[in-house]
Image: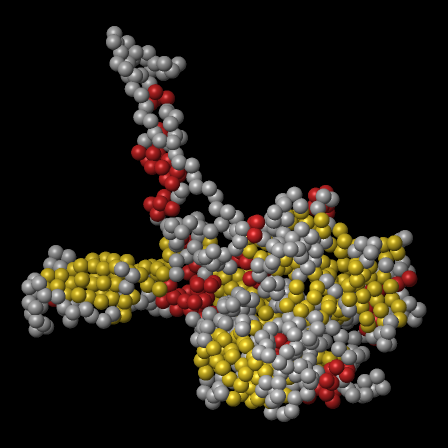
């Protein structure tokens, strides 16, 4: 049985249900498939969004599964919330976007054999590596068939926008907005002969709450295809939500907009891979400073295509032959008599001129090898298009139902500060909207370096080296993905502590409330290297509270060692740390920490197989380490659900009284027993909190996944190997064998030197792991060696064990 993704409490916070229903969940624009409810061993996996295929490629199998695309959160009524206390947060209007490695597969080092040919693509072909709605996409087998990504605008009929508000069912109000599609003006002419690309759509209305910097979001309940073309976005709102939205329609300061998220999958071109014979550049320590070794000219000529190398060699041997068989005029000059070229020098004519020398024929250069086939990779995109919603009541009275007018009332908010763990931990703010006290908003615990979506879940980070014009201009570009992290147990505790903050009313007799993610105006501040010093700076970044942000940092090559060391360190450091500063306008600014460290990242750690017992509700679990490094488990809080609430679980068969370490691709097997009777009819499902699981970073493995693949993972360093005449006499040591003829010193990596009476010292470049340079500031890299002593008598010392050293001068003896 294949391994699935481990479902944990923090994913519940992100809106993923603990146990999906047996039937498929239908969402406008996509189908979220759920596994069948069976008692046999079940793979626990997150629901997968199945993208609608393009018009001309519907019959092709997908090469790579699309990521989960979450539409606006589905409203949960109070009865369901009471039956499902596992749903601890209602994240309104949340859209989970593909991770950076899905959006930009070209950005990360390419694996051998990666990608696929154009004809193999099940998706339309993007003309570049960053697709958007300015691109025209091509069918993989019929380049004449092209597609354009739609934009949206409000449909206008007879001078009126088709925006309607009307009473709906269950005391809710229905708000509908009719949209029409159109291509970007830059490609409008070409789009006339192309088709619209099929996309997965979700929509949300966002506006700023008056008097604050807090953003309110109202997700679309459904998106209905319109027979006249385009679509209709439907929202189902309470009276308070309706009034808040209509007031936002009236005010330009609210910045109200409809955000349509367009999910689609295309094939993007991968960068051309270097020839296997092309020499890789090396990182070296020279006089205590990191430098980038450039490829020598001879190696570059060897790496050039054969035809180009022949021409280059001909040019070196005979400069006049650099352009093939054509000769320079001087080479065609006869040896005597008048010149055949007008204006050239005239020699005395001889009675019997010697035969004119013929040019030495040069072979035609061999044609260069054919260019390698362009390779592609799947890119899952989710891009927003915003439609402004501002309707002055005097110009658009038809939008506003009777009694809905009036100016925006002052915002009334209160902030509750709770410590977690209670009484000892960090203080977390919770924002309550007093105009609707059943809504309480929270912030993430932190933003952390993300892991990639595919296994192994390596860091979503890449180092790219810009060689520059000279050694002083070498720069390193760091690009990484940072995502929000929220501790689900903290929100479970907050629900208990905030229960008495919600007043009972006729509409809410049980004091039920929703925990929602706060979205507010924010900036990113980080400690970065500037002119050799660590300085805190405001970094340009668009903070997406649902999905995080991307950090792009450029630093000098000499600082590479410091940056990598900080990422590997398990202790606190100022460098590459910072905070997202939240300016809500309700209270003083709040800081959400930003942590860039390989030991504590956001993302998947395990894959799992769960086998539920239909009688007892126990779940047999097998957890596989799906990362690149060893994982250390200190605690693993567990719950069990059958679809109706959570019951605390007890782990049997796994002793966590001491930390347990799991190597990559290794697994743990144990059983989770419920501590109380389970309700519900679905198969039992174990849910974990993996917040306490930490990585023990494996630098070499991480470097393999993150470093520019034109850089060698191994480098060399100069070492002087020497001995002395007294050592060769072999008198003082009393060793048997007599005088020494040679001492052979071998280094790991197939390098060696031979010392003797005529050669007491020799310099050699010895191979050292690149990690030794990056992690040891006071060393230029450790190497391993062993020596063999050959005596003049013909005897030879037995093989020695390998020794380890990092000195620049290695003095060897007969011992």
In this view, which residue lies farthest toward the bottom? 676
In the drawing, does residue 779 fall left or right of residue 567?
left
Q: Is residue 45 left or right of residue 169?
A: left
| Residue at the top extreme of this rendering | 351
Give the residue at x 60% y 58%: 61
**Residue 258 % position (x, y):** 76, 62
- Residue at 66% across / 83% down in the picture? 642
The N terminus lies in which quarter of the figure? bottom right
> Closest to the observer: 244 or 523?
244
Colour scheme of the picture: secondary structure
146 lies above or below 46: above
Query: Would you place residue 85 above or below residue 546 in this image?
Result: below
The image quadrant of residue 164 is bottom right
Residue 537 seen from this side: no
Q: Is residue 651 visible?
A: yes
Left or right of 738 on screen, residue 129:
right
Residue at screen point 89% across, 58% down:
395
Q: Where does the image place residue 725, in percent across and percent down from the top left?
A: 10, 63
Instruction: State which quarter of the image contains the C terminus.
Output: bottom left
Residue 314 or 397: which is nearer the viewer?
314
Tell me residue 75's x, y (percent): 76, 75
Image coordinates of residue 86 in percent, x first then y, are 67, 82
| 230 lies left or right of 486 | right
Q: Pick the residue in front: 293 or 790.
A: 790
Q: Toward the viewer: 786 or 722?
A: 786
Q: Residue at x 76, y 59 (%)?
A: 387
Count of marks overlaid on the render: 0
């Amino acid at each position: 049985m294949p391994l699935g993704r481990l479902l944990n409490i923090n994913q519940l916070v992100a809106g993923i249900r603990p146990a999906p229903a047996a039937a498929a969940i239908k969402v406008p624009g996509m189908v979220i498939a759920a596994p069948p409810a069976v008692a046999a061993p079940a793979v626990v996996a997150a629901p997968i969004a199945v993208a609608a295929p393009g018009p001309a490629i519907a019959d092709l199998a997908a090469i790579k599964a699309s990521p989960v695309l979450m539409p606006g959160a589905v409203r949960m009524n109070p009865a369901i919330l009471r039956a499902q206390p596992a749903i601890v947060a209602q994240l309104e209007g949340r859209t989970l976007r593909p991770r950076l490695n899905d959006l930009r597969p070209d950005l990360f080092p390419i694996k051998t054999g990666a990608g696929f040919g154009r004809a193999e693509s099940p998706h339309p072909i993007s003309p570049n590596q960053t697709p958007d709605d300015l691109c025209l996409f091509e069918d993989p087998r019929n380049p004449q068939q092209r597609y354009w990504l739609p934009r949206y605008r409000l449909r206008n009929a007879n001078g009126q926008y088709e925006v309607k508000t009307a009473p709906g069912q269950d005391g809710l109000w229905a708000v509908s907005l009719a949209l029409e599609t159109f291509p970007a003006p830059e490609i409008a002419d070409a789009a006339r002969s192309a088709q619209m690309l099929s996309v997965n759509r979700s929509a949300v209305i966002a506006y700023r709450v008056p008097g604050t910097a807090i953003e309110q979001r109202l997700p679309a309940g459904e998106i209905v295809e319109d027979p006249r073309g385009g679509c209709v976005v439907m929202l189902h709102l309470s009276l308070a939500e309706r009034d808040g939205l209509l007031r936002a329609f009236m005010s330009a300061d609210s910045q109200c907009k409809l955000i349509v998220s367009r999910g689609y999958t295309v094939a993007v071109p991968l960068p051309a891979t270097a020839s296997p014979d092309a020499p890789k550049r090396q990182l070296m320590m020279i006089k205590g400073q990191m430098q980038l070794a450039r490829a020598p000219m001879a190696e570059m000529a060897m790496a050039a295509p054969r035809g180009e190398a022949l021409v280059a060699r001909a040019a070196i041997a005979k400069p006049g032959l650099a352009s093939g068989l054509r000769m320079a005029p001087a080479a065609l000059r006869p040896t005597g008599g008048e010149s055949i070229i007008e204006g050239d020098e005239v020699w005395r004519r001889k009675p019997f001129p010697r035969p004119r020398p013929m040019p030495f024929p040069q072979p035609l250069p061999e044609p260069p090898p054919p260019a390698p086939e362009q390779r592609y990779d799947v890119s899952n995109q989710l891009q927003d298009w915003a439609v402004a919603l501002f309707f002055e009541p005097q110009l658009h009275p038809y939008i506003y139902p009777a009694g809905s007018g009036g100016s925006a009332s002052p915002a009334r908010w209160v902030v509750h500060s709770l410590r977690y763990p209670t009484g000892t931990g960090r203080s977390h703010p919770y924002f309550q909207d007093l105009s609707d006290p059943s809504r309480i908003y929270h912030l993430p615990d932190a933003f952390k370096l993300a892991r990639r979506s595919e296994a192994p879940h390596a860091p979503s980070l890449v180092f790219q080296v810009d060689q520059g014009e000279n050694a002083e201009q070498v720069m390193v570009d760091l690009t990484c993905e940072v995502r929000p992290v929220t501790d689900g147990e903290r929100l479970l505790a907050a629900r208990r502590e905030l229960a008495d903050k919600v007043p009972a009313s006729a509409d809410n007799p049980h004091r039920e409330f929703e925990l929602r993610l706060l979205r507010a105006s924010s900036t990113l501040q980080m400690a970065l290297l500037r002119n050799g010093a660590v300085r805190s700076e405001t970094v340009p970044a668009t903070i997406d509270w649902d999905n995080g942000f991307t950090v792009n940092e450029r630093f000098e090559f000499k600082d590479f060692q410091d940056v990598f060391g900080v990422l590997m360190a398990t202790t606190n450091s100022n460098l590459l740390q910072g905070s997202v500063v939240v300016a809500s306008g309700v209270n003083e600014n709040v800081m959400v920490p930003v942590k860039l460290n390989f030991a504590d990242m956001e993302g998947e750690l395990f894959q799992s197989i769960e086998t539920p017992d239909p009688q007892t509700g126990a779940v047999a679990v097998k957890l596989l380490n799906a990362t690149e490094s060893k994982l250390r488990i200190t605690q693993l809080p567990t719950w069990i659900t059958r679809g109706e609430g959570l019951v605390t679980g007890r782990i049997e068969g796994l002793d966590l009284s001491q930390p347990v370490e799991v190597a990559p691709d290794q697994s743990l097997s144990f059983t989770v027993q419920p501590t109380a009777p389970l309700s519900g009819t679905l198969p039992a499902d174990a849910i974990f909190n993996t917040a306490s699981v930490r990585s023990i970073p494996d630098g070499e493995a991480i470097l393999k996944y993150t470093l520019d693949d034109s850089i060698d993972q191994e480098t060399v360093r100069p070492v002087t190997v020497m001995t002395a005449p007294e050592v060769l006499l072999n008198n003082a040591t009393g060793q048997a064998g007599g005088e020494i003829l040679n001492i052979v010193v071998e280094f790991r990596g197939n390098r060696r030197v031979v010392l003797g009476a005529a050669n007491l010292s020799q310099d050699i470049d010895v191979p050292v792991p690149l990690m030794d340079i990056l992690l040891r500031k006071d060393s230029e890299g450790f190497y391993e060696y062993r020596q063999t002593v050959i005596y003049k008598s013909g005897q030879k010392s037995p093989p020695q064990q390998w020794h380890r050293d990092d000195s620049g001068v290695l003095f060897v003896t007969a011992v």
